[in-house]
Amino acid sequence: MPAKINSVSTGTLIVIFILELVCPVVRAATLHCDLSQYWPAPGLTASVEMESLAVVWDGESGQKLRARFTIDAGIPTVQELAVQPPAGSWQILAQNLTPEFGLTTGIRRTNHGLPEENRWDVFWDTPLNRPGEVRRFSVAFHADRCAVKTDGARLEINFPGLEIGIFSGSVRFTVYRGANLLRLEAIAKTDEPSVAYKYDAALKGLSEELTPRVVWRDVKSEPQSATVSAAESNQQIVLRARNRLAIAEGAAGSIAVFPPPHQFFFARELEVNLGYVWYRKDDNGTFTLGVRHADKEEGYNPAWINGVFSLYNAPPGTWQRMSAYFYLSPGDAAECREAVMAYTHGDRYKPLPSFKTMVTHFHFAFAQELIESGSFDLTPPWISMFRDLGINIAHIFDFHGDGHPNDPGPLRLPEMESYFLACLKHSDENFLILPGEEANAHLGGHYNILFPKPVYWTHVRTKDQPLVEKHPKWGTVYHAGSAGDVFEIMKLENALVWQTHPRTKGSTGFPDKIKDTDYLQSDQWLGTAFKAMPVDLSQQRLGESRCFGTLDDMNNWGRPKYMIGEVDTYKKFPEYDLYGDFNVNYVRLDRVPSFEDWTPINRALRAGDFFVTTGEILIKTCSVEGQGTNREVVADVEWTFPLEFVEAVWGDGQTTGRNVISATDQLPFGNRRFRIPFDATGKEWIRFSVWDSAGNGAFTQPKHLRSNDGK
């Protein structure tokens, strides 16, 4: 009789052997997974099934999502990604995926005259321009277990044992009830003292059979696609994709990849699309899809290519979170793209009743460009680009490297006339260009003056020039020769002033050095400016230390001070991708004012009647309610990405405190009225902010309370 092995015939073994050659499977031992911080909830479940962890969650529009995780030879592995449309069957989008991370590091140095301990606040730094200091690392995994944690309406699946060169930590996958999102993160730290870095993040092992095409839109927003099998093997193909988005498409559905919309981008001088998504054809009919940063800047000014590409900060011991988002869709690439773009309102600032959108701080050399063109009818590309973003008011800063800012009048005043004419020519009832200027004279650091109408003035005052001159052509002209002169002009014209890029760049040491001056203590000094610079991916808030630290300190100094969002970049061209580098101010206005008199804008800003946002979160109302010591901050909020937390921040004139309320139980695309009670005893001011799971945020201006005892 023929021998038997475990009651399976030799013929059957041969068939199994052949099948394994044709259809290799991931083999893994029993998965050790800690579920002590997990509890099941409707639409959000996890279960261990011998060698794998199955996670099932409710997605968008009645869809369901499924992911299976395991560990193979120490590597966290996604055995399966699948989506189930309403009233449909499960559609498998991918199998046997592994995370891939790459890290490039340099050394962070100080600049702007900052002491070494403040090196983390520099802007003018290019660590990768020092080749001898650049190191590149690939990821290694040594996972032997996993852990699942329920946090509100999300599940976090964590695998320890990650190493990327000088960084070590864990890999985390996060899913959210109500969203088709899968977030991939390397959460890691280094103990080296002065690390600047950038990263790549990807999923490897996508099937050319299941998703044979990569689809994107080019920098002109024209649809593009490529068949993965046609690519050269083992070569990273960088896509300069509009909206920072690429999609793997197949018959069963699509998988999109994109970086966090704003947090991913460290500050630069230009918004050149350097290609933030990529794919790579690998062996055995698979490919990799991910996000990345370039190695260097590009653009029209060599000074910026050589001087500004600062990367992320990684202070020693801080947990850096290097993430990428994947979106699972049962539809084709077009349907998938539309769903992803909803998270950023289509890369537009959504209209909000009773508000107008305002962006500030751009160095276009606008007047000079039109003068040199010979026609004020020329429309520079940035104007249509701003309109497409949904911007109503553009506050621009000429005379910053262009024109003659330090001329006493003969050259500067005709240029100012051209500047005002250019702004008027290209403004209308829905789009207003405000002529501003980042002045660097007399007051200290860099600052902007926002007059309520076109005003002629000079930064210098010759021996024979009066402060106020009556000019036969331009009417009232001011000449400033000192801080006192500038302050007098501010008062005479009811202008607003604020510190641009506080505590860094040309404002290093400011506003601290002038905190006791009469002009900073006056109501003419609005406050300071917000920009996500520097970027430290261990921090929960954009601009956490430099920007909000300055705002809170200024309010503890005494008078109400506010923080206006700024962008601080230069010329724009149609192929640039602006949204990720922008923030916007929603100013409470019934309509866009006329160019002849925009007093309503100044009035709303001075009243603190505006909020700043990256665009995904809208604070429709915010107030302080109650009397005496028992009060509460009440805010109506709308958002897209799943939320992280809301908070009330207050000051007592000396110190700052906060009450952070987790909002991880909130589903995406939500609306809610938040109430945060607080004891007003001893508090002088309070403000409100909201932050989502992708690092996007919105904040109101501080509201000063009537008295120190809260009565």
Image: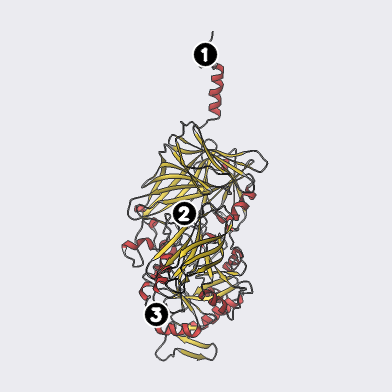
Which amino acid is tagged 1? Lys
* Residue 66 x/y as whole percent: 57, 40
Quarter of image, res 684: bottom left
Q: Residues within 10 Å of mark 1 (few under 14, many from 20)?
A: few
- Mark 2 or mark 3: which is in front? 3
For mark 1, give the secondary structure. Answer: loop
Pair 3/1: label in front: 1
**Distance Cα–Cα, label 1 vs label 2:** 60 Å
Task: Kindly report which numbered mark, 1 or 2, lies closer to the viewer in this rendering.
Answer: 1
Q: How many numbered tags mark residues here?
A: 3
Residue 58 screen position, x and y as percent? 59, 45
Q: Is residue 312 left or right of residue 625?
A: left
Of all residues shown, which one is farthest toward the top? 1
Proximity of marks 1 and 2: CB atoms separated by less than 8 Å: no
> Label 2 sits on what residue type?
Ala
**Picture layout, residue 369 above or below residue 486:** above
Q: CA distance from mark 2 to mark 3?
A: 39 Å
Which residue was labeled with disc 3?
442
Residue 341 visible from this viewpoint: yes
Disc ID at residue 4: 1
Q: Is residue 562 above or below residue 576?
A: below
Q: CA distance from mark 3 to mark 1?
A: 95 Å
Per the image, label 3 sits on a secondary structure element best described as loop
Residue drawn at the location 47% of the way across and 53% of the way down: 293
Nearest to N terminus: mark 3 or mark 1: 1
Per the image, the residue denoted by label 2 is: 294
Q: Quarter holding the N terminus?
A: top right
Residue 436 at what x, y percent from top left?
A: 51, 76
Across and down, in percent, residue 161 comes to 40, 41
* 246 and 629: which is toward the camera: 629
